[in-house]
Image (spheres, grey):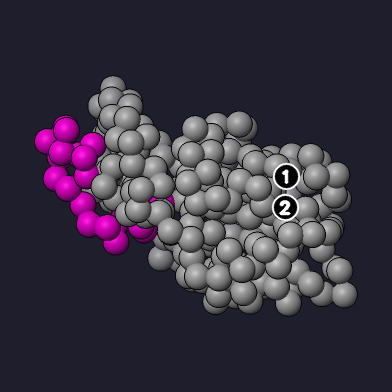
Amino acid sequence: MKYDAALFDLDGTLVDSVYDLYIAMNLTLSDLAFPIVSQSLVQSWVGNGIETLVKRGLSGDMQVSEHLDTALADKAIALFYGHYEQLVGEYSVLYQHVETGLAALRGMPKALITNKARCFTEKLLDKLALTSHFEVIVCGDDMAKKPSAEPLLFACQQLNVPVSQAIMIGDSKSDILAARAANIDMLALTYGYNQGENLSDYNPQYLCDTFLDILPVLNQR
């Protein structure tokens, strides 16, 4: 086997969780008398952690407004956390073939690396019965977030696998840049939350359209 360990992103890779985030976002915006936003907009903003997502919601744009009031942003983030805590996992579903694919990889050490906070990550994993698949779980509030290499390098260390024998599997530019910074091979999935980016522009080692497509890559001899 060419790879001895697999590092997985969560949202947009294993789980379609955007509806939970969309509802929490609009409850937060309504609390503050801000205009609500569409699900497609929220999906385009996902991938850099909840704090950035909320600031994008307040700005109504991918680019966070330079005039955004810090106190307002902090209040909005706190409100969002409250709403999301009630909603996390309620409307989230596994992407097609994720259960089958993870079961097929049961013998391979796996880590989950997400920019989502641990309190939400653990609740979501438990609701979708994913926890047992991962020996290591690294969350956004444990250390630097992707696109930093730090969580990927930490996961490899915990799995006791050299970076040359690990592969990162994700759906976004942040995943690709983190893998590149860590000098880890990257498999990018096209179906997730790519923020409108063409992932092939970032030259991942592999580009796959479905979750089952990862199996031939991970089972190389």
Q: Which amino acid does label 1 sit on?
A: Glu
Left or right of residue 91, residue 69 in this image: left
Q: What stretch is highlighted in magenta?
A: 26-46
Between residue 104 and residue 43, name the one nearer to us. Answer: 104
Cα gap from disc 2 to disc 1, whole angstroms = 6 Å
Residue identifier under label 1: 135
Q: Do the residues labelled 2 and 1 touch (CB within 8 Å)?
A: yes
Q: Is residue 202 visible?
A: no
Q: Which residue is drawn at 49% across and 65% down?
A: 95
Q: Which residue is drawn at 63% across and 55% down?
A: 8
Is residue 158 on the magenta stretch?
no
Residue identifier under label 2: 110
Q: Which amino acid does label 2 sit on?
A: Lys
Q: Which quadrant does the N terminus fall into?
A: bottom right
Question: Residue 180: x, y in percent?
Answer: 69, 56
Question: Residue 92: x, y in percent?
Answer: 40, 54
Left or right of residue 202, residue 216 in this image: right
